[in-house]
Image (cartoon, rainbow, N blue to C red):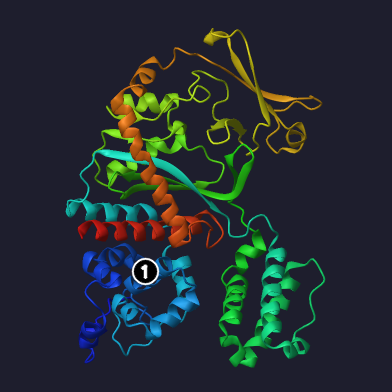
Amino acid sequence: MIKQQQTLALSPYIELYNLVIPKDNMLRQINELVDFSFVYEELKERYCLVNGRNAVDPIRMFKYLLLKTIFELSDIDIVERSKYDMSFKYFLDMAPEDPVIDASSLTKFRKLRLKDLNLLDMLVGKTVEIALEKGIIKSKSIIVDATHTKARYNQKSPREILLNRSRKLRKAVYKAEESLKSKFPVKNTSDVLEEEIDYCQKLIAVLEAEGGICELPKIKEPLNLLKETVTDDLEQLRISEDQDAKIGHKSADSSFFGYKTHIAMTEERIITAAIVTTGEKNDGKQLQTLIEKSKAAGMEIRSIIGDTAYSEKDNIVYTKDNEIELIAKLNPRITQGARKREDEFQFNKDAGMYVCKAGHMAIRKARGGKKAIGSNQVDTYYFEVEQCKRCPFKEGCYKDGAKSKTYSVSIKSTEHSEQTTFQESEYFKEKAKERYKIEAKNSELKHRHGYDVATSSGLLGMELQGAMAIFTVNLKRIMKLLK
């Protein structure tokens, strides 16, 4: 059964908060800035309103997750800190004497209450609404870019993940109390995942039985991480290390295994839209959706600022039809006019190569035809044949026995004459200088809010992480601009 909590107002110790939490405390400012009742309205249909034991207020549960993102702590550590940190209790609408939740409740909240909820669009939309109400957003431009996030499990097998984490825990214990080694269970030597899980559970049980040693920070952290891996992610470990994560390319010789978040942001550095995809997706293909999402959030858009990935032909036509300026330089390898099988081969602007739908990148390219006669020239991209032979998508793409696999694109130098003229103007060059702002925002997400590595496996988990991280950075930016 769900009901909104009212304990804070009834506490005789309420004045403590005014004594110990200053007016400029970030959590106090967020509470004053945001009416979190929207969380209750969105989630109330996911609870029984009349039967059963009282559930923890969904607003409080949501705020716990927000604290995790702001301070980059595990479930266990965020709950532990909320026992004694008065600013946390104030933010969570708890009375000073209130008990905290069990950390396992956060896992259930994520899996049962937030599943299939379009949290990303909802939270981005809420912060844009606040920014517009406060008169913070004045520009009519949005800056677009994509940032990558490495998968939590990389490309290791589930057993390798457990092996690595249990090994780190044992090493930490040996440094503190080597005599415990004799009490540890016999290491698993088989390749069976269930047996490795069983070993980890026994190891955890031995350490927890010892009590005091588990409170040492250098042991507590790897122990909590192993426990979360075995319990929270047990189902994911049995299925795969991360079925949704894909290989993406940052440059011709640099790749990553994980996800991409495609972002639209105002010149005031408020994120207005975001799309989370697997790592191999093309940046430019997300532009039109980012524009539509930004408009739905309340934005009026007159210009788009981005890199060459966004200057493909479809985007030029779309922005022109919608009377939007496209401040993105042309790349002749992207904007080449008509080419075959456009959906199967996407251009990666960082690497300067085409990538097939299986995620494999061309290894080299060659240009043929007469110079200075654009319509007669062709760029041919060569793929690694050994990969093509084993590719699950080879039917209709690679012919058995062929010694090479290529993809050719004709170059038409006159295809984008209007955009070519526009990008040489002083106005275009001046507006293009604003693009650095989104790179700084990507850096903030990664280095201050843990967005460089996924905190869970799967696309849904990545979307939840993105929703909370973007909600956090937008609120912080709004508060900074209000000052």
Please state the horizontal and vertical placement of residue 89, each as a whole percent of the image.
32, 80
Mark 1 belongs to which amino acid? Phe
Q: How many marks?
A: 1
**Crowd around label 1: few <14 · some 14–19 · many ≥20 (10 Å):** some
Query: According to the image, label 1 marks what residue?
Result: 62
Which quarter of the picture shows residue 45?
A: bottom left
Quarter placement of the N terminus: bottom left
Which quarter of the picture shows residue 415?
A: top left
Query: Residue at 26% across / 84% down in the picture?
Result: 20
Residue 344 visible? The answer is no
Task: Indicate left or right for 185 with 71 as reference.
Answer: right
The vertical placement of 2 against 261, above or below, is: below
Task: Indicate left or right for 84 with 31 as reference.
Answer: right
Please state the horizontal and vertical placement of residue 82, each as a whole percent of the image.
39, 81
Residue 178 visible? The answer is yes
The vertical placement of 102 against 368, above or below, is: below
Query: Residue at 24% across / 71% down in the picture?
Result: 24
Mark 1, secondary structure of its residue? helix
Query: Residue at 54% across / 7% down in the picture?
Result: 373
Which quarter of the picture shows residue 210?
A: bottom right
Task: Indicate left or right for 304 with 381 as reference.
Answer: left
Query: Residue at 20% across / 60% down in the picture?
Result: 483
Please state the horizontal and vertical placement of residue 148, each as a whole percent of the image.
51, 49
